[in-house]
Amino acid sequence: MTKQTLIEDVRIFDGERVTGTGGVLIDGAEITHVAPRIPRRPGWEIVPGDGRTLLPGLIDAHTHAATAEHLRKALVQGTTTCLNMFSYPLAELAALREAAASRDDVAGLRSSGILASVPGGPPDVPGLPKVSGPEEAEAFVAARAAEGSDYIKIVLADPATPALAPETVRALVTAAARRGLLTVAHAPRHAAAQVALDAGVDMITHAPLDTPLTPAFARTMAGAGRTAVPTLTMMRRMADTYGLSYEAARDSVGALHQAGVPILAGTDANEGGGPALVPFGEAMHDELALLVEAGLTETQALAAATSLPARHFGLRDRGRIAPGARADLLLVDGDPTAAIAATRDLAGVWRRGVRVRT
């Protein structure tokens, strides 16, 4: 018999909006009932909400976890799913997948596995497969699909380094779409974002630090049904580290938001190896605050970290509070739909219905 837990008297943010105050019943790993009042039954664990806010576990749409400890750090801060954007070597990824599948004290994981880059371009990793031209795109994507990649990451680099040609990017997008795989572009500059948009890449990550994305670019991106993961936490830290201007990244998010481009919360969390250090877990709360500063409402920022990444990455079992959804949950003091900083005031985290020691 599975364990049943009733979280009662909580303000419920269901992933899109506050639906009111009520209770949520967990049976094993699944939410079974959401209602204004759920009568208690003998044998249930009762968690008094005392007017706190219950929301879906956060989904970080851009991470670089390398160890189970990274996933643990994310989870104890309320991030119940990490979407990895590069994992290599594959043995390391296999260990991460096993930890995420078998343990409830670490965050869940999806990964691109090996990313697509041109010979001589980043990252400089010995033995990493690269893509020289469009004629190699089909084989590259087929190999990633065989390895279990959940989506295809494409690196569109700084103009000072070798970069994939636009026709190669288009070939990668075509090969991925043929297999039902999303494509995600690393595009830290305006020109790279333009290449990604023109090639049909599904998601563009990183808001540029050189010049803001224009309203016209944003409208075209919205009309094409593309998605943005601006990673403002990383861009802010890069700007501070290298003496760059953060305003271009912030203003880009404003333009994208005004145009109606779906914006997903992603931190670019890493603990070494990135252009700037971004800590797992706590950085997601920074990201939410920066999204609000860039023009999103608190409710929109919370959706960017719950229902929207679940929808756009095809994670149909999470990112919302509803019967049948997985019991990945975050309980916080206060009301983050009124003051986003309340997400930092953790009162409880559950993954697959198991309460996490925070």
Image (cartoon, helix red, strand yellow):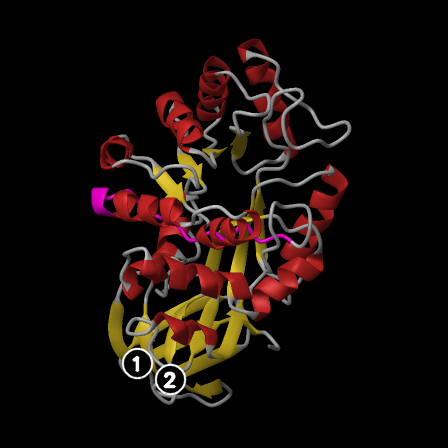
| Magenta stretch, overall SS | loop
Residue 242: image location, x then y, percent? 56, 47
The answer to if 242 sits in the magenta stretch is no
Of residues 14 and 83, which is closer to you in this image? 83
User: Any mark on residue 8, and which?
Assistant: 2
Of residues 127 and 213, which is closer to you in this image? 213
Residue 131: image location, x then y, percent? 61, 18
The secondary structure type at the circle numbered 2 is: strand
Residue 108: image location, x then y, percent? 57, 56
User: How many marks do you count on the picture?
Assistant: 2
First along the sequence among labels 2 and 1? 2
Of residues 199 and 17, which is closer to you in this image? 199
Q: Residue at x 70, y 31 (%)?
A: 124
Q: Which residues are magenta?
A: 258-270
Residue marked by disc 1? 22
Q: Residue at x 56, y 16 (%)?
A: 138
Above or below 150: residue 71: below
Measured in 3D between alpha carbons, the distance from the residue under mark 2 to the one under mark 1, in whole angstroms, is: 6 Å
Tell me the kind of residue under disc 2: Glu
- Indicate the quadrant where residue 111 lies: top right
* Circles 2 and 1 in contact, beta carbons < 8 Å: yes
- Quadrant of the snapshot with the N terminus: bottom right
- Quadrant of the snapshot with the C terminus: bottom right
In the image: residue 82, left or right of residue 272: left
Q: Residue at x 30, y 65 (%)?
A: 298
Residue 8 visible in the current orientation: yes
Of residues 349 and 229, which is closer to you in this image? 229
The secondary structure type at the circle numbered 1 is: strand
Q: Residue at x 50, y 78 (%)?
A: 348
